[in-house]
Image (cartoon, coloured by chain):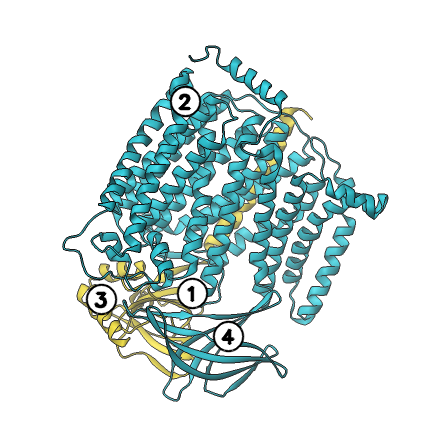
Amino acid sequence: MIIELGHYALILALVVAAVQSVFPVWGALKSDHRLMAMAPGLAILMFLLTCVAFAALTWAYLTSDFSLLNTYQNSHSDKPLLYKFSGVWGNHEGSILLWVLILVLFGALVAVFSRNIPQQLRAATLGAQGWVSFAFLLFVIVASNPFERISPAPLQGAGLNPMLQDVGLAIHPPLLYIGYVGFSIVFAFAAAALMLGKLDAAWARWVRPWILVSWIFLTLGIAIGSYWAYYELGWGGWWFWDPVENASFMPWLTGTALLHSAIVMERRDALKVWTVFLALLTFSLSLLGTFLVRSGVLTSVHAFAVDPARGLFILAILLIFVGGSLTLFAWRAPLLRQGGLFAPISREGSLVLNNLFLTTACAAVFVGTLYPLVLEAFTGDKISVGEPFFNLTFGPIMVPVLILIPFGQLLAWKRGDIWGVAQRLTSAFILAILATVALVWFMGASTTSIMTAFGFGLAFWAIFGSLWEIVDRSQVFKVGFARAMARVKGFPPTVWSTVLGHAGLGITVLGIVTTLAFESEHVEVMHPGETLEQNGYHITYENSWTRNGANYQELVSQYTLRKGDKIVGIMEPAKRAYVSSGMPMSETSIATFGFSQVYFATGDTDENGGIVTRIYFKPLITLIWIGTLFMSLGGVIALLDRRLRVGAPVSARKRKAAKNAIASAAPTPAE
Amino acid sequence: MTRKQKRLGLIGLAGIVLGAAVGLVLYGLSSSVTYFQSPTDIVAQQIEAGQRIRLGGLVEDDSLDKSGGSMIKFRVTDQAEAIPVSYKGILPDLFREGQGIIAEGYMDGNGVFIADTVLAKHDESYMPKEVYETLKEDGHWMEEEQAAAAEQSSNVN
């Protein structure tokens, strides 16, 4: 009964989406207030209906209702409660339903929080959002329905892939989807602006919060996915340049570019057409990512089932939206008014460079990701494009970005003075050099290559150079500490968000360079009581025993990690066998010292009680993820900026101005 | 500078950056991609020693030799030819004789494939796509075989 209710609600949501796709847009184009006024209510209704559908599926998982094909294939009554819950999206149908849920959630959020944007823009935006919702709801109902029943109902389910039975599944997909799908709203805003033919700085101000929210979640989603892969897969790798990872990384790159170009548009009314193009491109790449991951053209842990019909359906959605939005862009963009002027050396100029490099980097990733698919389709040759390709192409493109970051922060709007900025950055440059020398000395000068030292220098330059903005703005060397602190307190939030975002990138780069250059791996067969000396640690294999878990049995091996005479860690990596599927899994054991980690995984045992032990030393690796936290925090602070706050109370004067604007836009008030 | 000059400057700069990127990408695609080969391909083409390739096929039954401790030896077959593989490290959890795998590495001079990475299935029902297609093309793909392998793996545990 509950299942049928959910199924029915989903079909109703599709109908609502169809209505929302047509009438509000028609109303916006014809200035019909009654039609436009439908949009918010429809968006909220569609969200509520999809919630009912999602809740019904969740109910089936929590109560282990195996009369549902989806739960039978992907769940098991022995599973711990958390994995029953997160297992809802640990399969193809459920994950697409989560995708749709987040999609309509964003529509509802726009309906609720965008009361202060013009009615026309709001209606057209929600209408465009309706198109995306319609396409994906149709996909769920026609090609990937989670509510299919089987009769007779089996007594037990097939179980969830043990690799997904981890807290990571509860966090990574929802965060990533909020990021991916959030860009649909940005896309809808862009499509609305093109349809209405009106694009100004205010548009950028309304869109920026949505860009920021999506970007923050995408950043966190990618970072958590990376950490999950790192500790779960047992290979010690944190990024594989796997097509699925690239699929989420491409919208991140263009989304980051969009974040910056929207600032130029908001402040200076420039780069308008480019910003709209980036908005369309970013969501197109999100759709491409969904296609790559969900269609089965790639094989990975992310692709749950290979069904060509589904792949074709998503491909059709992708082509319609990419083709349609590009056509709309080509048709309407020339009508948009040219924006403000600026000199090449200026804040705007530096942001244009940022955009140029980020989109070029994205193009390189795009080629590397899709080339094998295209080549195989045309010639049948099977190739794999991996780390060497991306290190060669993506790496060099990122170098100028890191060099230019501190300059961009200090350049003035409109017309900047590059030599003046260079002088102001001299101290930061010296600090970066000193930090590099110190780190090279600490890691061992003889083992550090020139390239590694250069990488350290770039990272420290990005960190100190971006932090220097605080020193530079507070004028601490001129006005003294007390007055400088007062100035620091008065900084607008944008200063902190820029500093944190850029320093965070530097921190991530520092972690990447150090890990790549100094990580080491040791594989040994160890016998009980045997001690190994490695990287300054004494590692003793104590013994192994069997332990029963909730739905698995595991062989735990215990190692003692000593530094000198002191025990610094008891490591217990394990090998699990899951009861329902019999599938084996390795559980790694990681000890963190400062920012560095020691990582243990075990392999097979031999007849003499020996066990294959794999030990990784990962210097400063946690900085990779800590940096992304700083970047996200920068995004959150930018979101707190009062000027951007969605639904923030506006001053009486502004409200009056807005009213006048609406009145002038719509000469015939309704009712 | 006029608006037009600025725009030309910007287009010029974008052209330089994009040109450099295209150069890098083309060089990367010609030098640092790895081709997928089946054992038959390797025997037929006489691939030169040291060149990085991906070898895919089934792990030959009774070929797994773990006597060397962490140095593991096994043979990969496409039912026509078999290539001996040597690998130092921990095999993936789902590595079994009779199952499809992909190994990445290079041929040494003596006809042995030195693998530095071994990839197996992510779950019970997954088979590396390249392996599956190659086996199907060569007519060596049998559903029963996979069923037998799956059964075998559940017996092991």
Give the amino acid at mark 3. Answer: Gln
Quarter where residue A444 is shown: bottom right
Q: CA distance from mark 1 to mark 3?
A: 24 Å
Q: Nearer the viewer, mark 2 or mark 3?
A: 2
- Label 4, on which residue? A615
**Along the viewing direction, whichever of A51 and A132 lies nearer the viewer:** A51
**Hue used for the chain lettered A:** cyan
Q: Residues within 10 Å of mark 3 (few under 14, many from 20)?
A: some
Chain assigned yellow: B
Chain of the residue under the numbered disc 1 shown in the image: A
Q: Residue A1, percent across and down? A: 21, 45
Chain of the residue under the numbered disc 4 shown in the image: A
Please report the residue visible at 27 percent of the width from the left and 42 percent of the height from the top: A6
Total marks placed? 4
The disc placed on residue A37 is 2
Q: Residue A168, percent across and down? A: 43, 58
Give the amino acid at mark 2. Answer: Ala
- Label 1, on which residue? A233
Chain of the residue under the numbered disc 2 shown in the image: A
Report whether A470 appears left or right of A277. Answer: right
Task: Evaluate whether label 3 is on the same chain as label 4.
Answer: no
The disc placed on residue B146 is 3
Q: Residues within 10 Å of mark 4 (few under 14, many from 20)?
A: many
Q: CA distance from mark 2 to mark 4?
A: 62 Å
Report whether A132 appears left or right of A336. Answer: left
Q: CA distance from mark 2 to mark 1?
A: 51 Å
